[in-house]
Amino acid sequence: MTANLYHPASGFPWPQGRGFGAAFTFDVDAEAGALAFDSTFHRRMSLMSHQQYGPAVAVPKLLGMLEHHEVKATFFVPGFTADLHPDLVRRIRDHGHEIGHHGWLHEQTTALTDAQEEEMIDRGLESLGRLGITPVGYRAPWWEYNYRTTDMLLSRGFEYDSSLLDDDVPYRFTSDASATGSLVEIPVDWALDDWEQFAFYPGWTGSGVIESPRKALQMWSEEASVAAHAGNCFVLTNHPFISGRPSRLNALSALIEHVKGLDGAWITTLQDIARHTASVIEDIKVHDRVADPGPQPGQDDQGHPLPSTDDHLFDN
């Protein structure tokens, strides 16, 4: 890929001899992902079996594939998943992969009060703690990180988050609610998530358009190549019940081969990237809360669109 003005070098100080960072991450939502949307889904045996494919079939295959490539990954595990599949979570840990916090029941955090979000974080920590795991990384369910979340994570000993979408490289940050300390942010991107490519289940999620693994492989390979050229950080997010299916697993394996072949690749866990970032970056970004613009023309007092009252809008 030739240099051009659209991909200037990021200037991020990767470890000596490394030109860019790459991490393969997996959100082990399993049953929690569906039950958080609607708790009555526990009655839907077929839907539950769809989600159980992740822990029962996909994760073991993914672990074998990662071992073949000699790649360590980061697995974000909801507490409910850890409670329901403890042996699987231990197996992930025993293969040398990092395990991060991903809520308790994959909650929609924007709907929670402060107290409820703290309870969610603590329940997730307790579930992982029962397995002897103390996570240092957090990924908000649905990537919905709140301004208040920073203080909650800092007070519980977390080192990094991977939920925000505002950069191409890691950085240190705090928020307007945080008076002391900082976290490392390792940004994500919806274009680098298998959900948008493959996720579909009737009555729950997805557009109904399930893409070809070849398309996803091409798109993600191009993203990785640009990251290598610019010195960025390539973070792919996969879900075992989605990307552990046979043809998608083959595509993911091919992607790892591609990334390994890029000059200067540092493929590692998010924990390693976060700790390196904390050691070389001094500046701390402040995420100030965006001001409430208030209701706009055509909206009610809560900011919702008003119904149209012009019945003759298209009359001539």
Image (spheres, grey):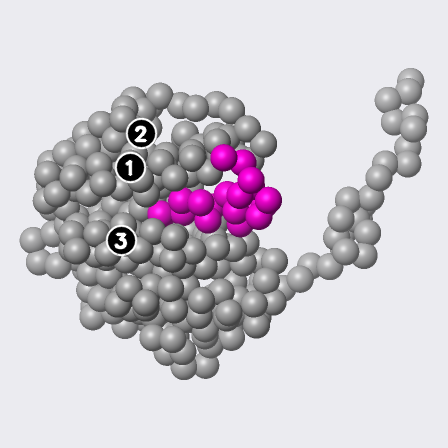
List x then y, in percent, for residue 5: 30, 40
| CA gap, disc 3 and disc 2 | 21 Å
Precedes in sequence: disc 2 or disc 1 = 1
Q: Amino acid at mark 2?
A: Arg
Q: Amino acid at mark 1?
A: Ala
Q: Amino acid at mark 3?
A: Asp
The residue located at (24%, 56%) in the rendering is 90
Q: Name the secondary structure under disc 3.
A: helix
The residue located at (25%, 45%) in the rendering is 24
Q: Name the secondary structure under disc 1.
A: helix
Magenta stretch mostly in which secondary structure?
helix
Mark 2 closeness class: few <14, some 14–19, many ≥20 residues within 10 Å: some
Whether tag 3 and tag 2 are in contact, CB under 8 A, the answer is no
Whether tag 2 and tag 1 are in contact, CB under 8 A, the answer is yes
Residue 34 colored magenta? yes
* Pointer 2 residue: 245
Can residue 104 be seen from the camera position used here? yes
Residue range highlighted in magenta:
27-45
* Pointer 1 residue: 58
